[in-house]
Amino acid sequence: MKNILIVQTARAGSKSVPNKNIAFVTEQNMLFEVPINKVCEKVDDNIDVCISTDCLTITERMSLNNLVTLIKRPKTLSGDNDSHHDVMIHAVNHMEDKTGKIYDFVVVLLGNSLGCDLKVIKDSIDTIVKEKYTGGMTVSKFNMFNPYRAFKIQDKEIQNQIDVPDLTNDKNCMGDVYFFNGSCFICDRNILISKKGKNPFPWVGDRILPIIEDLPKMEVDDFWQLSHVRKQCSTIWHKYLTREQKEKIEQIPLTSTQWSGYKNVEFNLRIWESVFRKFIFSPDHNYI
């Protein structure tokens, strides 16, 4: 049986969206809690879970979870330009010193995304071992972000980010385009420690298993993405409703003004949050 360490990296002081890791995305959960709670649902004896953080709020909220080891991230690894890779290695060394184990795989979760289920992680590790991948990472298909359509502004002019050949149709010329979506990295422990993989993510090696997720997940690095994540959470809540609860929701009267604003994400979120708070939220249950 493989020894697995799950590490969430979630620091304080985010700049793109201030305090994004501790923004509430459901009635009960902050953003960082969604991925960590998913993996804590069915933790086996061969799996250890930890959070590397310098955030007091995260520390306080996780101090009550006896399945998670809190790692106080040093100031030298907490700055805007400090190495994420070194944060991972620091967490591995800390946990191996604490447990006496040498881990086979390290799963890295971020604090600004929704993460993935433990079953997906386990199945992916089985595939990595069987088919001799060096690691894996979750991706989502975003064909609308074709790299040939990426630009930079230099000297007040639009410039190509990459060399672009002569194209008949720039939209479909590259086939399907996948991006890392923030759910998780799965790393061979020795490859992560060695720092010998290929960029931009050397911790997963050079033969990487694509863990394709149909739900268009993404890391939160702008305010509109936080709204998108909250909407995804409302979709997740919906599957826990009984038929009777769904029928009651459908019977809730909405004024013409409400219907006209229904397509607005934030307005839609407020309506659904009030509905789900009434029907399914309980202090004794975590629905994410």
Image: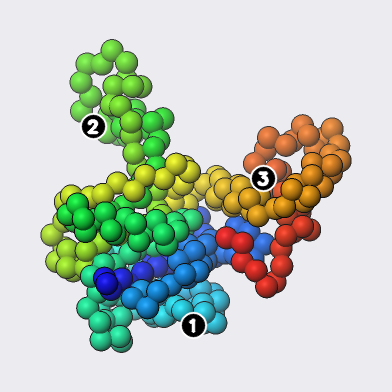
227 in relation to 29, above or below: above
216 in relation to 34, above or below: above
Q: Position of residue 78 (x, y in %)?
A: 36, 70
Q: Nearer the viewer, mark 1 or mark 3?
A: 1
Circles 2 and 3: CB atoms closer than 8 Å: no
43 in relation to 18, above or below: below
- Nearest the eye: 204 or 264: 204
- On screen, residue 277 versus residue 96, left or right, reads right
Identify the amino acid type marked 3: Glu
| Residue under the point 39% across and 37% down | 141
- On screen, residue 182 versus residue 25, left or right, reads left
Disc 2 to disc 3, C-alpha distance: 36 Å
Q: Position of residue 132 (x, y in %)?
A: 17, 54
Q: Position of residue 110 (x, y in %)?
A: 41, 61
Q: Which residue is mark 2?
A: 162
Q: Which residue is mark 1?
A: 66
